[in-house]
Amino acid sequence: MRHATVIIGFALAIAACAYKPGSYQYPSREFVGQRTTVGCLDIAVDRRTDMGSAAVLGYTFGNRCDGPTVIDLAWVNVIGRTATGAEVTLVPYDPKGELTVLRLDGRQAGSEAISYPAPESLGQLCVDVASLAHTKPAQWLCFGNPEALAMVTP
């Protein structure tokens, strides 16, 4: 009987660590930024402080389904807009070729920060979160430049 109690306790501990759909909460993961759901993914995206001329996006994602799902940080569609309104298609900084399509196990979560080099400072950064999960139609989230806002705030 004691063996069964240990197994049940272990199963409950694992279940308590599983990602809960729509909760945007997971141990040691904070879902900061704009939140949305795309397919099996609950996603939060936030624009972080630029690194030189590179814009930085933080992604946090949780799989709301029981089975694995796709997360593609390598080919997510990201567009920047300059102060003059010109649109620039951005690609992630990945000098070692580490970004690839991954399968996120059911009820698991993860996070990543990706920098996107740009030819000049960007006033706005937009990301198609549907492309993270290889789904359509596009679902755009846009972010202003926090540094530019800080410069004009009295």
Image (cartoon, helix red, strand yellow):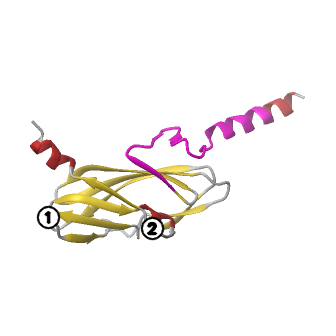
Q: Report the magenta residues as a range.
A: 8-37
Compute the Cα span from label 1 to label 2.
25 Å
Question: What is the x, y in percent for residue 42?
Answer: 52, 52
Q: Which residue lies furthest to the right in this view?
A: 1
Q: Nearer the viewer, mark 1 or mark 2?
A: 2
Q: Do the residues labelled 1 and 2 touch (CB within 8 Å)?
A: no
Give me the residue at 62% from left, 49% from top.
107
Give me the residue at 86% from left, 27% from top.
2
Q: In this view, does 125 lie to the left or right of 61?
A: left
Which residue in the structure is indicated by mark 2? 131
Q: In which quarter of the image is residue 123?
A: bottom left
Give me the residue at 27% from left, 59% from top.
125
Q: Quadrant of residue 91?
A: bottom left
Q: Let me know if residue 29 is in the magenta part.
A: yes
Label 1: how many residues lie within 10 Å, few (<14), some (14-19) or many (20+)? some
Question: What is the x, y in percent for residue 53?
Answer: 17, 60
Q: Which amino acid does label 1 sit on?
A: Glu
Q: In this view, does 29 lie above or below 60?
A: above
Near-viewer residue (50 or 149): 149
Q: Is residue 55 above or below residue 7?
A: below
